């Protein structure tokens, strides 16, 4: 499923709204890298690929900006392991 993902660079967030709930990825920029530090999907909308879509879009942004993808968030760590092309 395609989700409308919005970037809020001033807050270092990517967000999407689903059924009135907000899911998001929070990141930080440091030393030429983009580090995903939190991936949050409210329980009522879990299991729909929302976290994966948010992480993918965040790392696409990192690539567009010439930033190295990094992950502190455990979900993002696993995502990078499963998607080595994102590195």
Image: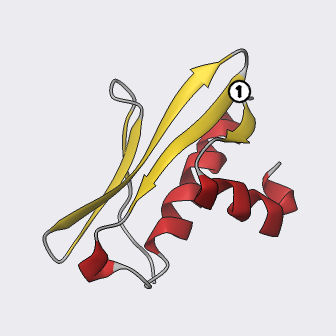
Relative to 63, residue 10 above or below: above
Query: Which residue is label 1 attached to?
Result: 33
**x, y (%) of residue 59?**
64, 48
Relative to 19, residue 75 above or below: above
Residue 83, quarter of the rendered image = bottom right
**x, y (%) of residue 10?**
34, 23
Q: Residue at x 44, y 77 (%)?
A: 2
Q: Is residue 83 visible?
A: no
Observer-nearest of 75 and 56 = 75
Relative to 60, residue 28 above or below: above
Residue 64, quarter of the rendered image = top right
Q: Residue at x 81, y 62 (%)?
A: 81
**x, y (%) of residue 50?**
44, 72
Relative to 64, residue 1 above or below: below
Q: Is residue 28 left or right of residue 23?
A: right
Q: Residue at x 39, y 71 (%)?
A: 3
Which quarter shows the N terminus?
bottom left
Q: How many marks?
A: 1
Q: Residue pushed farthest top?
A: 31
Observer-nearest of 62 and 42 = 42
């Amino acid at each position: 499923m395609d989700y409308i993902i919005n970037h809020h660079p001033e807050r270092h967030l990517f967000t999407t709204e689903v059924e009135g709930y907000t899911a998001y990825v929070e990141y930080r920029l440091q030393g030429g890298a983009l580090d995903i530090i939190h991936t949050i999907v409210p329980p009522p909308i879990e299991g729909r690929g929302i976290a994966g879509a948010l992480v993918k879009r965040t790392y696409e942004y990192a690539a567009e900006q010439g930033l190295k993808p990094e992950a502190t968030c455990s979900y993002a760590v696993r995502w990078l392991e499963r998607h080595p092309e994102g590195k």
